[in-house]
Image (cartoon, grey):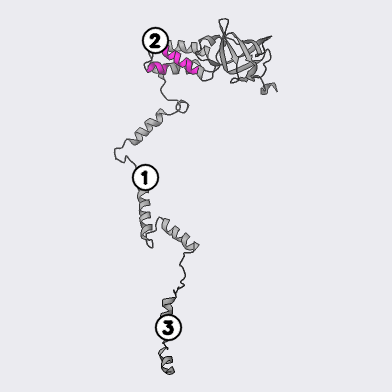
Amino acid sequence: MSIEHSISNECTVDEQNEDDAERFTVVREEPELRATVDLEIQAKVDTNHPDGGTTGLTLEAEEKLAAREMEIERTTRRLDDRQTSDREARSRAVASRGTDRKTAPSRRDPREDLSREGLAAVNRQAQRLAADVAGYTAAAIGRRLAAQVAAGRELLDAVLDVREQLFASGAPVPLGALESVPSGEVTVEGRLIDVWETDSTAIQEVGLLDDESGRTKLTVWAGSDQPWIAEGERVRLYNAKKNWYEGRCSVALTRWSRVEFPDHDRWWDA
């Protein structure tokens, strides 16, 4: 009996391996294939090379390459590619309208479009404005006036518009023309010929400003944080606020004003 029992419990090697495979999960170790850095660089060079083809590319890479070429062709294609295209002529017209007069001296002068009587009237007004505004010649002002008159505007309206433009540009306003300037803040230049004493703690300095066209009162408020101006000194005042004193126009320096001394630090005085 014992011999039969021992024989019945014996099994083959193959049967034993099958039993082990059912009980345990067999993991096969296989090396992962990865491209080296040199291979990746070479692949990128081959892909982006203009003479390279699509050989060796995956389907996804081929689709990306085709889409990129289509996008480049679409963005570089000229919209107006007719043989009778007027694109160049239109571009020249736009460029000529934006050309600076200094770089294009052959540009037409608007005064040439006026009649003899109209040109004479424009020149008279230009001379008058040039006397009121420093830093501009009568010829430059005349061109501005002529451009507006040639466009169909009345001369009086053109004079008022150009006058306001010149004063708004920061050009010094003659003291004799302060009352006619529509702006509430002006730029003036003159010499402080007289300084008055004041008992008001709100006033830092008060005096009389003079230039060739007239004189006006100058007030420097104590809270303006402005420098002191010595008597006899020439100054240029920016953003000076206009005031009225005893029926006459005067100027005052506030915190937003700026003072310059043109005679200071001149190289010929060194």
Residue lying at the far front of the rendered structure: 1
> Earlier along the polypeptide chain: callout 1 or callout 2?
1
Residue in the image at 42% along x and 83% along y: 16
Type of the residue with mark 2:
Glu
Secondary structure at badge 1 equals helix
Write down the quadrant of residue 230 in the picture.
top right
Write down the quadrant of residue 258 in the picture.
top right
Residue in the image at 43% along x and 12% along y: 122
Magenta-highlighted stretch: main secondary structure? helix
Q: Circle 2 is placed at which residue position?
A: 117
Which range of residues does the magenta coloring cover?
146-166
Q: Position of residue 8 (x, y in %)?
A: 40, 90
**Quarter of the image containing the N terminus?**
bottom left
Q: Is residue 116 above or below residue 225?
A: above
Q: Residues within 10 Å of mark 2 (few under 14, many from 20)?
A: few
Q: Position of residue 81 (x, y in %)?
A: 31, 41
Q: Nearer the viewer, mark 3 or mark 2?
A: 3
Mark linked to residue 16: 3
Horizontally, residue 3 falls left or right of residue 204, namely left
Instruction: For marks 3 and 2, give the CA distance.
Output: 125 Å
Q: Taking the image as drawn, is residue 121 in sight?
A: yes
